Image (cartoon, grey):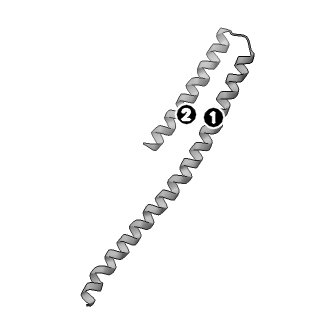
Amino acid sequence: MTEIFEIIVPILISVFIGVSLLLFKNFIDKSKIKLEEKEIKDNVEKVVSIFTAQEEETDSALASMVKNVAELREYYIINKQQARNS
């Protein structure tokens, strides 16, 4: 009887520790995702404000360049998030 407990107890402890680690990792991942979402939202808002500011100005080469840089920044932010999640 004690031999069975000697086998079962370490197995149960290992399972409990494994599940605890998975839950902790899940919690950490969720908090990182929330921070990344906030960062992306802030950066997208900056890009949108640049777009709206440029739309108010006349169409010129400089305005087109600023608009293109804003788009590149948005793509960079999205790619950065995808790289972190992979």
Quadrant that contains the C terminus: top left
| Residue 52, horizontal then vertical, whole percent | 71, 23
Q: Mark 1 points at which residue?
A: 43
The quarter holding residue 18 reads bottom left
Q: Position of residue 11 (x, y in %)?
A: 31, 75
Query: Total marks drawn?
Result: 2
Q: Is residue 34 left or right of residue 2?
A: right
Q: How far apart are marks 2 and 1 (CA)?
A: 8 Å
Badge 2 vs badge 1, beta-carbon distance below 8 Å: yes
At a point 55% along the width and 33% down the height, the residue shown is 77
Q: Which mark is residue 15?
A: none
Whole-percent x, y for residue 51 in the image = 67, 23
Q: What element carries label 2?
A: helix
Query: Residue 79 in the image: x percent, y percent?
Result: 49, 33
Judging by the rendered image, the residue that carries numbered circle 2 is: 77
- Are there few (<14), some (14-19), or many (20+) residues within 10 Å of tag 1? some
In the rendered image, the residue lying farthest to the bottom is 1
**Residue at image point 51% right, 39% down:** 81
* Residue shown at the point (58%, 48%) measured from the top left: 34
Q: As displayed, is residue 28 above or below residue 5?
A: above
Q: How crowded is mark 2: few (under 14 residues within 10 Å), some or many (20 or more)?
A: some
In this view, the residue farthest toward the top is: 60
The secondary structure type at the circle numbered 1 is helix
Question: On screen, 8 above or below 71?
Answer: below
The relative height of residue 61 versus residue 68 in the rendered view (above or below) is above
Q: In which quarter of the image is the N terminus?
A: bottom left
**Identity of the residue drawn at 61% across and 24% down:** 70
Kind of residue sitting beneath label 1:
Asn
Q: For the residue marked with disc 2, what is the amino acid?
A: Ile
